Image (spheres, rainbow, N blue to C red):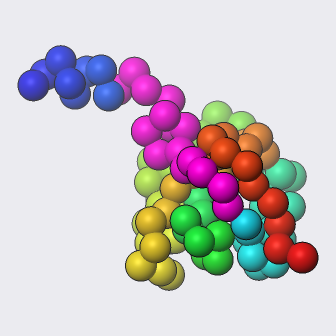
Amino acid sequence: MPVAVLAAGCLTEAQQFGGSGPITLSPEVTRAFEWHKHLGGYLVVSSDGGHFGESYCATKDCTDVGVLDALFKCRALTTSDCRLFAKDGVVVWDGPWRTAE
């Protein structure tokens, strides 16, 4: 069992918490993403693209606690699964994404 815990510690946030598959971001989540690109930190979105949670850092060196905070915020708003969409302004979502029109 210690090996599994040790191996999990080597994964990046995107590997541990990242989302995948096609997603369409709601207008509210799209606005949050625009802010996120300037502020950095973590942006987590619900699998339906309708909700988000964020955690911003004063520096570009965020910790894993930040992604957990963002996940907690998102999960408080929805019953859909929440996954990491972007870190420090860079999309880490594995799959096509678009904004709602």
Q: Is residue 60 left or right of residue 101?
A: left
Q: Is residue 81 visible?
A: yes
Position of 14 relative to 66 (above/below) = above
Q: In the orientation shown, which residue stands out farthest toward the left?
A: 1
Q: Quadrant of the N terminus?
A: top left
- Identify the residue at image location x=43%, y=39%: 16
Q: Can you give x and y, in whole percent of width and height, for residue 50 in the image?
A: 64, 77
The region drawn magenta spans: 9-23
- Identify the residue at image location x=13%, y=22%: 2
* Magenta-drawn stretch contains 10: yes
Q: Is residue 63 visible?
A: no
- Identify the residue at image location x=34%, y=26%: 9
Q: Can you give x and y, in whole percent of width and height, for residue 67 in the image?
A: 51, 50
- Identify the residue at image location x=39%, y=21%: 10
Q: Can you give x and y, in whole percent of width and height, for residue 28 in the image?
A: 77, 78
Where residue 87 sits, quadrant-wise, is top right
Q: Quadrant of the C terminus?
A: bottom right
Nearest the camera: 88 or 62? 88
Position of 63 relative to 32 (above/below) = above
